[in-house]
Image: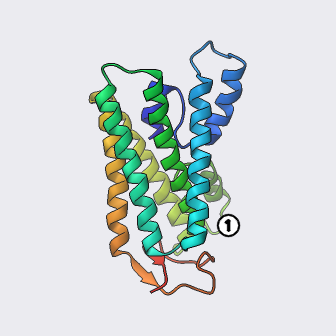
Amino acid sequence: MDVVTFPDYHVFASNQTGNTALLAVGALSIGGSIISLQHVGVSLGFFAAGGLVSGQLGNLFGCQRRSWLIATNVVQTALGFGAAVLHAHTDKSPNEATDLVIIGLLAFASGGQVAMARTVHVPEVTTAMVTSAYIDFLVDPKMLILNNRPRSRRIVFVCCLILGSFIGAIAYIYVNLSFALYISALGKLLVCIALLFNRGENSLANDCGTADLPCSVVTFHR
């Protein structure tokens, strides 16, 4: 998603580390006026709102329940498709208000996605930030051990992120931003469908507790 939003809006929808740096760049007018403080502020604000809403509702309803995971992913998918449709209908006559709405929709969805990833306690898959995955892989004392689930998760996560970035960039170059956003939303839709078939396990004492479960397992109350 960030690969295709940055060229048009010069802001990240999910990488808020980058946006935090851009906040200083924009505020001090480094590099001219390419960075919009409005864009950065909207992305940061809506990302935080998405994380707050998704995280706290997850705490309320059970962050590892299948029903909640599907519900929050459906909302994120709808926001992604909404941003794609809005851009497709305003591409020929863009305006700042529409740009801010698109950024807000994508950032809110991204905040919900990252909050969901954190609360299901699979720390190797951060979904948005890859720096920690790189370092955790490099410092892992069990890096070369065959049966090392955390390391394997990190490898799959990084490979998927790289592949997705190239797919998004190619879609942006050879078609347009709307098409790339549709692909991103379609990926979220596939996640929603996959959650219907994930093997479930009875929750432990705490619905949001930690458990070393395979990636294909969703912990939920039967």
Q: Judge whether 65 appears above or below 163 on screen.
A: below
Colour scheme employed for the rendering of this structure: rainbow
Q: Residue at x 44, y 41 (%)?
A: 1
Q: Quadrant of residue 217?
A: bottom left
- Of the pair 216 and 73, the residue shown nearer to us: 73
In the image, is 112 to the left or to the right of 30? left
In the image, is 106 to the left or to the right of 151? left
- Of the pair 104 and 125, the residue shown nearer to us: 104
Q: Position of residue 77 (x, y in %)?
A: 38, 52
- Whether residue 14 appears in this view of the structure is yes
Q: Position of residue 33 (x, y in %)?
A: 60, 14
Amino acid identity at mark 1: Pro
Quarter of the picture holding the C terminus? bottom left
Q: Position of residue 64 (x, y in %)?
A: 52, 73
User: Tag count in the figure?
Assistant: 1
Q: Residue at x 42, y 21 (%)?
A: 95
- Whether residue 167 appears in this view of the structure is no
Local SS, label 1: loop
Q: Judge whether 130 appears above or below 74 on screen.
A: above
Q: Quadrant of residue 192?
A: bottom left
Q: Quadrant of residue 15?
A: top right
Residue at the outermost top position: 32
Mark 1: few, some, or many residues within 10 Å (few <14, many ≥20)?
few
Q: Judge whether 54 appears above or below 38 on screen.
A: below
Q: Residue at x 44, y 25 (%)?
A: 8
Q: Which residue lies under the disc numbered 1?
A: 141
In the image, is 85 to the left or to the right of 131? left
- Of the pair 222 and 157, the residue shown nearer to us: 222
